[in-house]
């Protein structure tokens, strides 16, 4: 069974750093890209960026460029989303999902369960 | 990149058909046949319902269908059932090699 299992909920203070993870199973890690999506009550779903684990080639949404870092460790088949200095506005539910690596495959067919990040003083 | 525009809510009675629109621009919806649709029940992750405008993944009911005309894509649900009550989001590939989601539509089964 194909699954993307994400790390658990986090509560952090403003200014703290954070790295959340997404570990796929049931398929070859380098056959699919991993995308990260933010969900907030006010803005719905937002695509943050995509990484191809094979060579760590990464593309970011202009809205998130410089705000987060997407990475992957293919030795342990895990993708990451990290912040160096969290803000209250980063409070949201974050999903990872997969997309087949081919350029004509532009949909996200399997999603993780989501990681809730709460940033509060 | 602005979010694609969807109606905030659509409702229908069991057995009826409804349509959800998703309006973008020639740089996203209108420029590519790369529109997908996702269903999200409360507290659950999104689920792929339609890809490449009108294709259904294996296991998705044929009551769901997609289409596109110009800069507007549509998701139709026929024979509405209680289990269809959820939020629906469209998504499109863009000319900037990025992705954009729609604003989301809450479907209510009366």
Image: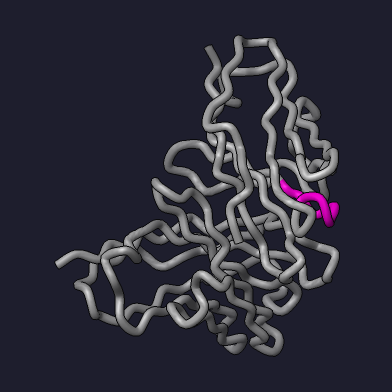
Dividing the picture into quadrants, the one containing residue A102 is: bottom right
Tell me: A68 left or right of A97: left
Query: Quarter of the image containing the C terminus of chain A?
Result: bottom left
How far across and how far down the image is residue A105, in percent? 81, 62
Dividing the picture into quadrants, the one containing residue B84 is: top right
Tell me: B78 left or right of A86: right
Q: Is residue B10 above or below residue A9?
A: above
**Residue shown at 54%/35% (left/top)?**
B87
**Residue shown at 78%/48% (left/top)?**
B51
**Residue shown at 48%/55% (left/top)?**
A113
Q: Is residue A97 above or below residue A16?
A: above
**Residue that protrudes farthest toward the left in the picture:** A121
How far across and how far down the image is residue B53, in percent? 82, 45
Residue B57 visible in rendering: no
Tell me: A76 left or right of A53: left
How far across and how far down the image is residue B21, in percent? 69, 34
Dividing the picture into quadrants, the one containing residue B77 is: top right
State the predominant SS element of the stretch in magenta. Answer: loop
In front of the other: A23 or B43:
B43
Q: Is residue B78 above or below residue B91?
A: above
Q: Which residues are magenta?
A: B29-36
**Residue shown at 51%/37% (left/top)?**
B41
In front of the other: B83 or B107:
B107
Residue B5 colored in magenta in the image? no
Colour scheme employed for the rendering of this structure: one colour
């Amino acid at each position: 069974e194909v699954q993307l299992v994400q790390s658990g909920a986090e509560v952090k203070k403003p200014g703290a750093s954070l790295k959340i993870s997404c570990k796929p199973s049931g398929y070859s890690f380098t056959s699919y890209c991993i995308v990260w999506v933010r969900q907030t009550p006010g803005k719905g779903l937002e695509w943050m960026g995509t990484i191809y684990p094979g060579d760590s080639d990464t593309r970011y949404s202009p809205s998130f460029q410089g705000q987060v870092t997407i990475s992957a460790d293919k030795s342990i088949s895990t993708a990451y989303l990290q912040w160096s200095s969290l803000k209250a506005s980063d409070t949201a539910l974050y999903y990872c999902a997969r997309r087949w690596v081919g350029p004509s495959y532009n949909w996200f067919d399997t999603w993780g369960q989501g990681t809730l990040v709460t940033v509060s003083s | 990149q602005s979010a694609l525009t969807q109606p905030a809510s659509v409702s229908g009675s069991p057995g009826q058909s409804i349509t959800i629109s998703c309006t973008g621009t020639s740089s996203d919806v209108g420029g590519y046949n790369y529109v997908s649709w996702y269903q999200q029940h409360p507290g659950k992750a999104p689920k792929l319902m339609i890809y490449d405008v009108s294709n259904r993944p294996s296991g998705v009911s044929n009551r769901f269908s997609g289409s596109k005309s110009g800069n507007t894509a549509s998701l139709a649900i026929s024979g509405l059932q209680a289990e269809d009550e959820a939020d629906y989001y469209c998504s499109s590939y863009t000319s900037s090699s990025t992705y954009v989601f729609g604003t989301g539509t809450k479907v209510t089964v009366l």
